[in-house]
Each structure stands twice: as structure tokens, then as C-alpha cells.
Amino acid sequence: MKSLPILMAALIAFPAIAQRSKNKTEVSVPSSVSYGVQYTLPRTAILIKVEATQTTFIPGPYAPWAEPLLGIKDAKTKAQSFWHIEKISFDTFADPDPTQMYKTNNPVGALLQLTPEGCLAGINSNAATGKKELPVSNSFTTKHQAKTLSFDYMIDNPNLSGRTAPEQRAAEAAFRILKVRATRYDIAAGLLDEFHPDGEAYQESFRELNAIEEKNLALFTGKSVTENSTFYFEYIPASEPTKGEVIFRFDENLGFLSKNDFSGKPVTIDVEKEVTSQPAEAQTSLLPATPSSGIYYRQPGIALVRLTKELAEIATTRVPIAQFGKIELLPADLIIEGFSVEFYPETGGIKSVSKK
């Protein structure tokens, strides 16, 4: 019975064998490696940045009388909120790939540089291992409040009050607009030059008249305000091409919605592997029979990324994707002989090889 605690202690002291899940394109870490330095290859995640504007409109309280009093046709009488996508851009960042975990027990293990997430960053190098700060992802908004809009009624006529019938107050506002326009015409026509001895007073009078007209006219035509918003969406491609996967939903009135909210129309992503011709000798993997002879890394492939809304392409880019690449082996002899290797953090591909 004493042998049982000893066996359990041995299991705790020596980590379990690291293996990768098997599929058609992946190779398991040989079971002979039961101890050593563990490292992970990165997979590439796509960060989608969407810049949008929201225009909020409130109708004027005198909109029903805009046409009979001022000749303004089709004055809006309902509040509206309108969203518009202005710009879309892409970025990539590294995420540890749970299917690409390895251990090495050769002397090179002591020379590995790893990121805070445990991804391979360099070997015998000064590779930066700091974590890249990314914007917080907010995939949708449900309560986006626009700036408060209100009206100044400017009831200066002592015969009018808040209890006066709306049509009477509308008539007073229309009278002010017409009076301002008449006064501005008289000034421009030179009929009131005696009240403007210099050019600055002339311009100031125009500014004041324009402000009065604008405030009163808004009572008929309404007010609007436009605000800018930025949204971020993360997407991690699979190792196989993806087509038509919903990233978020969008509605011109409701804005950005969750991909499970069918109130909006879907915005989908396609990630396709770019086909490139390779020489015959490059099509054979360099994976050895045992991992003790080197360090695994992944040479990424190129992907075509497209965003589509209502069957129309709204953004596209080409980016290297680690998942579309091949697992290769970096010989341990190369490092032992004094070479330094640095890897791209987003893809795991070799960035540089130099003699130290």
C-alpha cells in the first residue's frame, strides 16, 4: 500500500505527456517526450475595427404647419435614428493554439523565449515577449444614447404663453422667420446703412439675424446630431477555409446587434486560403521521427478575408494566417552552433535567423 502515494507523487512531479488533437493536417507530439520545456505555437486571430456614425433626429413641434406657414414641404414628423458604417479595417494578434502544444528536452529548451501566454517568440534571441494591448471587444450595443436634443421656444410675445394653441405659437415663429428675412434683405439692399457705420457691425447684424432664423426654423424642420462610434470584433479562423460565418448583425435604425439577434441583417466573414504554387521539394514536411532533434514552428499561409453585408462586399484584405500554414522543424544543431532565431508573434513564422 505504501507504493500508491509514491506513485501519485511521481505523477505529480512529472507532467503528463503533451499531445495535440489529431486531424488530417496535424501531427501528434511523440509520446516519448514526458518532460522538458513546454511551448505553444500561436494561432492568428483577426481583429475587425468598424467605425460608424449615428445620426439622431427629432421633429420640430411645429412640423405640421411647416408647409402652410413657410412653404416647407415634407417636414419630418417622426423621430429617427440612422446608423451608417463609415470605415472597416483589420488587424491580427496572436492567440495560443490549444492543438499545437509541445515539449522539448534538448539543450535548446533553455534558450527559448516565450510570450506571457506561453507562445514561442524566439530562440537564443532578444525577442520582445510583452503582451500586445488590444481594444476591448464590444460586439454589439443595445442602449446607445445620443446627445439630448431640445428646443428653445422663444415666446417673447406677451400675448402668448405655454397654454396658447400650438398653431398660434407656430404662426408667431413663422412671423419671426419672415421678419428676419425681410430685415436681412433690407440690410443687404442698403436700405438700413445708417445703422451700420462699419463693416464689423454689418457682419454682426447678419450673424444675429441668422441665429434667430435658425432657432425658429428648427421648430418646423427639426434638429439632428451625429456621433461617431467604434466597434471591435474578434474572430479566430479555423484551420480550414470559412465561408458565410456571421460576425454581427446590423440595422440602419437599431445599429450593431448580436449575431443571434435577428432584428438586424447579418454581416458575414469569408476566410479563404490563397492558393500558391510551391516547388515539389517544398511540399514535403520536415517533421522528424522524434521532437528531441529540434523545435517546431509554423510557416503561415496567406488568407483572403472578406466581409459581406446583404450580398455586397464591404471590406477585404490579405493577411498571413498561422492556421493555414505548415508545421516545420528547426534543427537543434542550428541553435547549438550559436544562431539566433526570432518569430513573428501573430503567425509564428520565422522573422529572422542570425549568427550571434
Image (cartoon, rainbow, N blue to C red):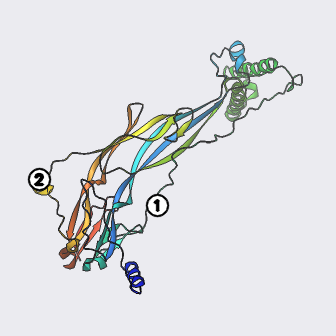
Whether residue 22 is visible here, answered yes or no, is: yes
Q: Secondary structure at mark 1?
A: loop
Question: What residue is shown with label 1?
Answer: 133
130 left or right of 352 in image: right
Residue 317: % across, % down: 33, 44
Q: Decide: is 263 above or below 134.
A: above
Residue at position x 30%, y 79% in the image:
110
Residue 208: % across, % down: 72, 32
Residue at position x 36%, y 79% in the image:
14
Residue 298: % across, % down: 26, 61
Residue 197: % across, % down: 73, 31
Quote the CA–CA distance across marks 1 and 2. 39 Å
Dot 2 amino acid type? Pro
Image quarter of the N terminus: bottom left
Q: Earlier in the sequence, mark 1 or mark 2?
A: 1
Residue at position x 38%, y 54% in the image:
45
Give the numbered dot on residue 112: none
**Residue at the farthest left position:** 280
Q: Decide: is 115 above or below 108.
A: above
Q: Decide: is 122 above or below 187.
A: below
Question: What residue is shown with label 2?
Answer: 279
